[in-house]
Image: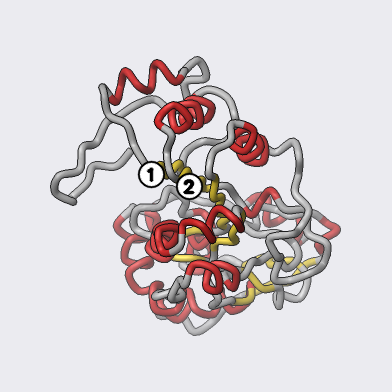
Amino acid sequence: MYESDIPNVNIIKADLSDVSMTANDMQTLLGESEFDYVWDNASKGASGAGKAVVDCAKQWKSKLLTYVSSAGVYQPNDVFPMPETTPVKETAGQVQYEQYAKECGLPLVSFRPQYIYGPNSNKWDYIDWYFDRLVRNAPLPIPEDGTQKVSLTNSEDVASLLASVLNDEKAAVEQTYFNCGTSNLVTYDEVAALCAEVAGLTDVNIQHYDGALGKAKFPFRLSNFYVSPDMVIKKLKWEGPKHDLKGDLSWYYESYKARGCLEKDMEFAEDKEVLA
């Protein structure tokens, strides 16, 4: 959990990876507090802390449990953007969490984000992959023809998406599942060009390879994989994204340098396997 700059916010730190955590343990951490609205952006399944959150929300008779799932639970069927009706992997932990919450009779809303970046996100690999190679004048192995589309969403847009459940709580629960992502799509090759521009580079050494050869360490899927926020705009009156990747890359690159990424020793051995 992050420290907060917002006044009157009580931060309680806990090890949410503890598989033995129960609702009683969580309630002990929280004291006598009960909550009408619960946002869970940490649980990966219906055990341990995940089960504890659901059980607590049930005990509190919470008005809304908003869960951050993942678009990774989808099994794409070549329909893009992937709608909320896309088949899911029933064995995925996030799907089991959703099922458990529904079995408990909770008013559940589940968001399915993909490829999040931002100052307070915990995932940097997607865009770092491009900068890692560009600043070292190394080739960028991108599968197929590089025109595959992807949705890269700023964490602040994700936060406003999650907050939009309060715009119409009834509609949120009736729909239950919402895709979580920007409508500003980019292709794999376009990400390379945008990163090169902000780094002040004119030459981009993209080398496309046959996806059948393997994925190397490419951060995205081999094919198209993106969602649309149309449903949350329609049902919950979300105003749409305030950010786009092109506008965000300047501060991102400054962060990349501040994190010491320019000084890291990298060899890209996996890349050579698909470019040989």
Outermost residue on the left side: it is: 7
Labels 1 and 2 touching (C-beta < 8 A): yes
* Placement of the C terminus among the 4 image quadrants: bottom right
Q: Amino acid at mark 1?
A: Tyr
Query: Which residue occupies 29% across, 57% down?
Result: 258
Residue 209 in picture, x, y percent from top left: 78, 67
Q: Relative to residue 40, is residue 139 drawn left or right?
A: right
Q: Relative to residue 158, is residue 112 drawn left or right?
A: right
Q: Nearer the viewer, residue 100 or 185?
A: 100
Query: Which residue occupies 40% across, 31% down?
Result: 60
Q: Amino acid at mark 2?
A: Thr
Q: Nearer the viewer, residue 64 or 180?
A: 64
Q: Residues within 10 Å of mark 1 (few under 14, many from 20)?
A: some
Question: Can you identify the residue that label 2 sits on?
Answer: 66
Query: Which residue occupies 32% across, 69% down?
Result: 251
Query: Mark 1 or mark 2: which comes first in sequence?
Result: 1
Please indicate, yes or no, whether residue 273 appears anywhere in the rendered image.
no
Is residue 146 positioned above or below 131 on the image?
below
Q: Residues within 10 Å of mark 2 (few under 14, many from 20)?
A: many
